[in-house]
Amino acid sequence: MKSGIINVYQYFLIILVLSGFCPVVSARVIFVKDGSSLQSAIDKASDDDTLIIARGTFSANRTIFGDSLCGNCPQHRTVIDATYAFIIKDKSICLIGSNRRESILMTNAGYGLYILNSPKCTISNLTVTGGVRDSLEMASDGAVVIRNSNVLLENLDIINNNHEHGSAVAGIAGVVGREGAEIIVDNCRIINNSWDGVALYRGAVAIITDCLIKDGRGAGIGVTWDAICTAYRNIISGYWKGIGAFGTSWVSARNNAVYDNLGWGIIASGNSYMDVCNNVVHHNGNCGIAVWGSNTSGRFVNNIITENGWKKFWVCPCVGVYNYGDWSKWDFSYNLVWNNKEGNYRDIWDQTGVNNNISADPEFLDKTFFLPNRGSPVIDAGHQEISDPDGSCSDIGLYGGPQAKFDISPSLK
């Protein structure tokens, strides 16, 4: 493949790559021109090569294959007929777009970018779109599907993978983490896909930060089986569920804005554990937070839970906090719960005044970034052992605790 003319931007990008982004200086930097085959370039690349993808639309042909394992079936060893578009297999490479919104992968398949057995991959500065749902209900379709790989996804637009198949309730997720996946998802816009924003199955481990996850079905972040997830500073809106922990999963959710989802804001079910701190759970259709099962456990600390219950009863009562489990297994303290449609609590005694929980108007300046007024009751009202970045006592809500930031990620603007 011939190299194009190296402009100033490309030169800067190469320096960035060679100085640590993809740190092996002996590897090649390959420029993939508009109109050429991206899959061919991937196939020819060697370990630690970096592919710089030009502005343009790179379309793929569907490849039909049998997935040897099923990410979300009761029987894990179930072969699933599915399709993929682009595949990175058995190698470590970087794919970097020249322009986030103009370097476009048009996938035309159920598994859009399929990363398998890759020790180290970086996917950055691209748009991934145009997925086509597979017909089998249990195919774990996603714009990006990752198995047995260590992957950094950053500065991506994962959008409009919204095709649905009449025989399948599930659609196409934004990111799917499967067996052996270790993933960082940072500063991504995951918008208008037809299933979960990020779905984690079967032991996947993910850190999800500073993302806009908006307008899909399923869960904004859904963590099940024995997956593990740390999610902080994300905006999650427009799903059936905001953040969900299922199976035996472990979830740490901090400084997320979870609002305008149709059913639950945050739900723990099965045998899952959740650590839920400094989130805003606002104006979700039914309940804000739900403990759904006697084997769940964890803590809710420093959260704002307000104005939930705008939709007619669908999956849970229209309240702030709904207990359908064993409340003794949960630490619920230093939260503000206020003005939820059918009450702040259901199937649990009122927590106002207990363990430093309060009920008052949080005095938001806006209801997108949920910045509190200077006189808000949430200021310095959080848990005494949790500090803000300046060392003061933590605020309740998004801007409290060690993960708080007062600047907004570019993805969220």
Image (cartoon, grey):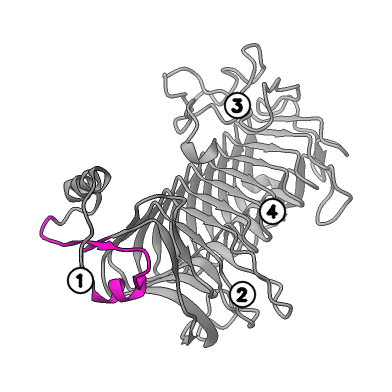
Task: Please report the residue visible at 81 percent of the width from the left and 56 percent of the height from the top.
Answer: 315
Residue toward you, 93 or 241: 93
Between discs 2 and 4, the one toward the N terminus: 2
Tell which tag, 4 or 1, sits nearer the viewer: 1
Name the image quarter holding the C terminus.
top right
Is residue 268 shown left or right of residue 64?
A: right
Between discs 4 and 1, the one toward the N terminus: 1
Q: Is residue 248 visible?
A: no
What SS does tag 1 mark?
Answer: loop
Q: CA distance from mark 2 to mark 4?
A: 18 Å
Label 1 amino acid?
Ser
Which residue does the numbered mark 3 point to in the structure image? 396
Q: Callout 3: 10 Å neighbours few (<14), some, many (20+)?
A: many
Q: CA distance from mark 4 to mark 1?
A: 40 Å
Q: CA distance from mark 1 to mark 2?
A: 31 Å
Which residue does the numbered mark 4 point to in the structure image? 239
Label 4 amino acid?
Tyr
Q: Which residues are magenta?
A: 25-51
Q: Callout 1: 10 Å neighbours few (<14), some, many (20+)?
A: some
What SS does tag 2 mark?
Answer: loop
Which residue does the numbered mark 1 point to in the structure image? 46
Q: Is residue 341 above or below residue 372?
A: below
Is 31 in the magenta? yes
Between discs 2 and 3, the one toward the N terminus: 2
| Quarter of the image where one finds residue 152 | bottom left
Is residue 321 shown left or right of residue 183?
A: right
